Image (tube, coloured by chain):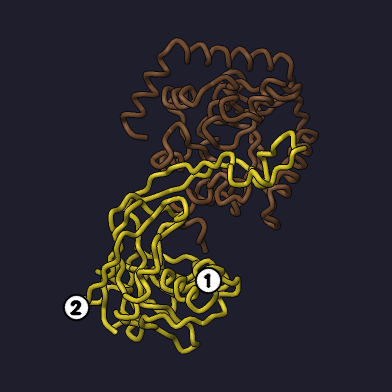
Chain colours: A yellow, B brown
Amino acid sequence: MRPLKITAYFLTPPAMGHICLHFDGVLAHILARERTDFWNLPEEVVQLNLELPLKCIRNENGDFFWCASALLFPEWYVSIIYKRFEVGAIDYLSDRKKQINIGSGKFRHWFISMPYSPIPEGIFYAYGDRKEIERLLPHITSLGKKGAVGYGFVREWKVEEIEEDFSVVKDGVAMRPIPIWAVEEAESQMIGTYKPPYWDRSGAGIIVPAGAKVRLKDGCKVA
Amino acid sequence: MDAKWRETFQMWSEMREHRERVKEALAIIDEALIRFKNPYVSFSGGKDSTCVLHLCLRRKPDIWVWHWDYSRLFIPDWLEREIQENMRRLGAKNIVIEQRGTKKIEHSYGYRSFFAKLEKCKQKYGWDGGFLGLRAEEGGKRKRWVKRGDEKLVFPIAKWSWLDVWAYIVSHHLPYPSIYDRYAELLGWDRVRMATFFDPEFDYLGSSNVDGVILYEFRHRI
């Protein structure tokens, strides 16, 4: 395993509902797909106990986090996604239908605010197995929310080996959410998840958020 | 608020159209104060209720002010403190604050407790009418409500646009919650609204996406 710099070149801006995008989450997603039926992820993905091709920092209680950074977006804009009459669902209408319900059901109209960040490229740092990461990444064609409507398309992935590791801390700043047990001193704390799947709140604990100043305990440093 | 927008709103406040709307709002309040002996103003802390409260206080400085605290489930503590501080800075004296229960997150529970507590206050303090900062421009439902009217409620700024509201705030140097500055940067001053945050009720509008980006620390508070 080596310190790596991974660059995602975006074709379209990624949309998000959260301030950062976790690289270990991205790898876990694609590994989970590989382990299961590729197109239909089971709900109990959380039970898969995935072994990511990344270095893992563990504590004495068996809790752990992966050495992979999160992408923090520098600026935000908001666009609105509209959905209007869906021609594709027209077969659901019978001859007797006189009025179409646009409040719910197949023909529901909606608009949602979607924050996006117009960045040309996103840089992740990781400490892991380059070959395995290079094998997995091409499966990821988009990052963030609403890839199906064109947000966050990844044109190209580039993986480089670097000398110094920045996967957890860079210049004294947390590069990812770090559980409090790994921290000696930190600028701020909050409650959050720190390992994939990040949406599973049962894995939440006190963390130091990405972007906060932090000093790790000696036993929890990457290299 | 940056200097450019401040100047824009200041200029709008000098327009005849805006001045007439302010005059009209004051006339509505004057007329309502003849009808109601003991009215109250609903104050959410947002921009619209800030204007209504200020307008009402100009006519009746000792008017009752009713504020509903959505609890720390939906409003950060620092923002709630700011709202209550603003209420006092605007000159409100007779303030009644009630809090939403924190047992359930469902909005039906919130509505029920809101109306139950408001009704209790009406009986306790003998309120016979109220002022509400509702604007027709905000949406279809509100437009219909304004058109239909309400015997016990008056909407002094029903015809105001978002420009009128900000022009009134800027020209009278009124305090407004700082959260507007954060949201306006992303949404623009025309679309910015202060509602409850991470509220499932507004998920269908994607509000939680925007909250997730701006109020990240509130979702993950300890």
x 40%, y 60%: residue:
A142
| Image side of residue B123 versus residue B33, left or right | right
Q: Residues within 10 Å of mark 1 (few under 14, many from 20)?
A: some
Instruction: Tell me whether marks 1 and 2 sit on the same chain.
Output: yes
x 26%, y 75%: residue:
A4
Quadrant, the N terminus of chain A = bottom left
x 29%, y 66%: residue:
A157
CA distance for labels 1 and 2: 32 Å
Residue lying furthest left in this view? A163
Image mark for residue A204: 1
Residue lying furthest bottom in this view? A60
Q: Amino acid at mark 2?
A: Glu
The spot of residue B20 in percent (x, y) is: 51, 11
The spot of residue A104 in percent (x, y) is: 68, 44
Q: Secondary structure at mark 1?
A: strand
Q: Are marks 1 and 2 in contact (CB under 8 Å)?
A: no
Q: Amino acid at mark 1?
A: Ala
In the image, B1 versus B121, the foreground residue is B1
In the image, A133 versus A87, the foreground residue is A87
| A111 to A38, vertically: above or below | above
The spot of residue B180 in percent (x, y) is: 45, 39
Q: Which residue is mark 2?
A: A163
The spot of residue A106 in percent (x, y) is: 65, 47
Image mark for residue A12: none
x 55%, y 75%: residue:
A46
- The first of marks 1 and 2 along the sequence is 2
- Callout 2: residue from which chain? A
| A162 to B7, vertically: above or below | below
